[in-house]
Amino acid sequence: MEIKIYKDKNEVAEQFSAYFVEKAGEHEAFHVALSGGSTPKIVFDVLAQNFADKVDWTKVHFYWGDERCVPPTDDESNYKMTVEHLFSKIDLPHENINRILGEKDPEGEAMRYANLLEIDLDRVGEVPQFDLVILGMGDDGHTASIFPHQIELWDAADHCVVATHPDSGQKRVSINGKVINTAKEVAFLVTGASKAEKVEAIIEKTEGSEVYPASLVNPKSGKLVWFLDEEAAVQLNQN
Ligand code: 6PG
């Protein structure tokens, strides 16, 4: 596990974008799972504005680690956010975008998307392997759309599951822990003071932190890199 700490959200976005460009350049076909959330939104802006001409987008195949079960025009949609902040600003072939279509039949879509991943991606055993999975972390320690109240979904047999947001009850389709932990690289993008307590608990593996799904991110053979700003890292043991 590598922990990178930067001054603020913008520096996290700049540094992660440079990392993304480097990783994309290592692959003839780069399969990446995107995340929703406020930090990825800033990253997409920076990637589009400052790095767009440094990537051969024809080689980048975008998927999502999770998506809200809403139409692609809904402000809650991770797809909509990504189109607005990244896809609309780069020369990306439309066929390289693999949206989760959960708005009509979440359970059916979870099965379809799992099958798509198993066909499109290399596999380790039966588990589809992303080149890069980008994750955020909620204040409650959730990641992708695996929340503490449904932590059993992390080890679900199906590679994609239907989760529900603990407050709104909104349905979401999410990859499970097996897919996340099979990735070649996992990048956690976590910023802001509200994350500091969980970041410390999870990285320092304090007692009780196992209840947070984000604490279960531990790539079997892949690399885990935390991109943190100083606020999110403030409670980490710095020595
Ligand atoms: C989503 C994300 C979710 C997000 C966290 C952190 O669909 O919302 O996948 O897991 O990454 O909630 O979000 P912030 O970066 O906005 O705190």
Image: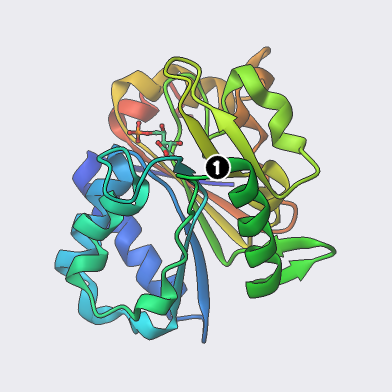
Residue 26's place in the image compared with 138, above or below, is: below
Residue 73 rendering spot, x and y as whole percentages:
26, 49
Residue 27 rendering spot, x and y as whole percentages:
52, 81
Residue 11's place in the image compared with 190, above or below, is: below
Name the one closer to the observer, 35 or 137: 35
Which residue appears farthest toward the front when viewing the image? Answer: 104
Name the one closer to the observer, 181 or 12: 181
Residue 8 rendering spot, x and y as whole percentages:
22, 38
Q: Is residue 203 visible?
A: no
How many numbered circles are shown?
1
The residue positioned 75% from the left and 52% from the top of the image is 220
Residue 19 rendering spot, x and y as whole percentages:
38, 64
For residue 117, side relative to residue 33 (left or right): right
SS class of the residue under badge 1? Answer: strand
The residue positioned 73% from the left and 27% from the top of the image is 152
- Quadrant position of ligand 1: top left
Task: Examine the image and state in which quarter residue 25 appears.
Answer: bottom left
The residue positioned 55% from the left and 44% from the top of the image is 105
Q: Is residue 71 visible?
A: yes
Which amino acid, mark 1?
Val
Structure colour scheme: rainbow
Q: What residue would you read off at disc 1?
A: 173
The residue positioned 82% from the left and 62% from the top of the image is 126
For residue 229, side relative to residue 112 (left or right): left
Residue 235's place in the image compared with 32, above or below, is: above
For residue 127, side relative to residue 226 (left or right): right
Which residue appears farthest toward the left when viewing the image? Answer: 49
